Amino acid sequence: MGAKNFKYVILGGGVSAGYAAREFAKQGLKPGELAVISKEAVAPYERPALSKAYLFPESPARLPGFHVCVGSGGERLLPDWYKGKGIELILNTEIVKADLPGKTLVSGSGESFKYQTLVIATGSSVIRLTDFGVKGADAKNIFYLREIDDADKLYEAIKSKKNGKAVIVGGGYIGLELGAVLKINNLDVKMVYPEPWCMPRLFTSGIAAFYEGYYQNKGVKIIKGTVATGFTADSNGEVKEVHLKDGTVLEADIVVVGVGGRPLTTLFKGQVEEEKGGIKTDAFFKTSVPDVYAVGDVATFPLKLYNEIRRVEHVDHARKSAEQAVKAIKASEEGKTVEEYDYLPYFYSRSFDLSWQFYGDNVGETVLFGDSNPATPKAKFGTYWIKDGKVIGAFLEGGTPEENQAIAKVAKAQPPVASLDQLAAEGLSFACKI
Ligand code: FDA
Ligand code: NAD
């Protein structure tokens, strides 16, 4: 079988891939020049929907409703859009071998693809409990959530285990978003995580206390400071019990595990420089290998604002890094350059009727402001992070679009603060006047 040849190949069909394809089209593309190769069966979509509206009991979100680039207010790229631009969308195709010096990719069914320029956009895969030998972790109805197929299986289980018992393992993004959506589906939900509070990689204890209180008020039971050490299944192989390290046994019809992700870099091991678990890039997402770029979750890039090398596993960066890489590729073809990537970290989450945004960096001292009582209807509160006398990060629950813009501005401007007490007293109005 002869190899298919393309000028550009985007490897991966997720968020970055979709935004990169749009940028290629914007910058000028001839039919047949670009291929997007994805192991998924569908065109690129906004992955965040999977842990939220995709699992709603009433009118759940379904494709084509959330194909990229709708998540950032753009037009949806339906499969016909790729066709119309002469972009080959090669779906259901997993690349199992990458030969970077030979500029060739090989699929599981033995097809070869040659490229002049490669954009690696393989994203992350989930960490599984079977990876560290948790007993019984391969039982049926233990779910992970990364791709639309995973979400479909979970959705079916939610329907078939009506009013059943669910245990969520992990207190990060997946844990909190899935804990809420399973509760909305009227399951009896228990969450288990090892840390003293949820989402410790971002939340302070003060922020976490609000969400834990809110979830408990909704009827979610939270078990902290312990981990799942084993599962038992019934004669059909379906999970029935979750055994915790502290000796507790929880009944379960459905288990959802969210214990972190791992960037998908294995195809390129030994062929490209890596750092901090990702593929090392410059400010244009160029890797150590000529004509090879890496974007989204897999890229470890210079975060100019903090003069540090970082990897970011969030959708805003997936979109922006993809656009930056394509602009840089196109500019370099004309002997030009683009400005360095100057990213302000932005993360968000939504669950129940809550919605928060965070901008900047979460290091240094913190100040909690506003009403963080979980019993207050439509509570609005936030936190500033202060380092070297300057505000460098800001979190806000329940903000209006204008207020969210204000905390973004404050995180970027890094204004000095005279006193933490005064900052706490001023609260959101401090950000609004910047
Ligand atoms: P992404 O995972 O989107 O895409 C990778 C693609 O590559 C997939 O299509 C995959 O199948 C494909 N692929 C991988 N290896 C391949 C191979 N060998 N051959 C072929 N194809 C291959 N962030 C946020 O800021 N707010 C939010 O609310 C959420 N919510 C959220 C929910 C859920 C359920 C998840 C899993 C993640 C989020 N995120 C998020 C994180 C965000 O979705 C994530 O950072 C981006 O999707 C990353 O985009 P990428 O394009 O890098 O990877
Ligand atoms: P995470 O890193 O956010 O959270 C992992 C959590 O797993 C930890 O906080 C800890 O509580 C828990 N944990 C670790 N080991 C454990 C163990 N042995 N037993 C029980 N708990 C354990 O990862 P995630 O929630 O799995 O999310 C996966 C990926 O999806 C991440 O890249 C994340 O950024 C992304 N995502 C993002 C959003 C968002 O930005 N709103 C939403 C969903 C998913």
Image (cartoon, rainbow, N blue to C red):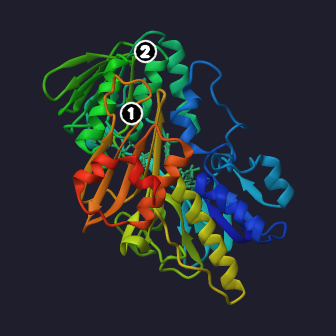
Residue 90, image x, y percentages: 71, 54
Q: Which mark is residue 133?
A: none
Residue at the top extreme, as displayed: 163
Q: Amino acid at mark 2?
A: Leu
Residue 276 sits above or below residue 128 on the image: below
CA neighbours of label 2 inside 10 A, class few (<14), some (14 to 19), many (20+): many
Residue that appears at 75% across and 49% down:
75
Residue that appears at 50% across and 71% down:
342
CA neighbours of label 1 inside 10 A, class few (<14), some (14 to 19), many (20+): many
Q: Amino acid at mark 1?
A: Leu
Q: Earlier in the sequence, mark 1 or mark 2?
A: 1
- Residue 297 lies left or right of residue 83; in this view the side is left
Q: Is residue 239 visible?
A: no
Q: Nearer the viewer, residue 366 or 341?
A: 366
Residue 180, image x, y percentages: 43, 26
On the rendered image, what quadrant is the N terminus found in? Answer: bottom right
Residue at the bottom extreme, as displayed: 335
The residue tagged with tag 2: helix, strand or loop?
A: loop
- Residue 220 lies left or right of residue 46; in this view the side is left
CB of residue at label 1: within 8 Å of ligand 2?
A: yes
Residue that appears at 69% across and 44% down:
67
Residue where numbered disc 2 is placed? 187
Residue where numbered disc 1 is placed? 176
Residue that appears at 21% across and 18% down:
249
Residue 55, image x, y percentages: 55, 26
Residue 413 sits above or below residue 67 on the image: below
Residue 156 sits above or below residue 86 on the image: above
Residue 358, image x, y percentages: 42, 50
Please tell me whether mark 1 or mark 2 is closer to you in this view.
1
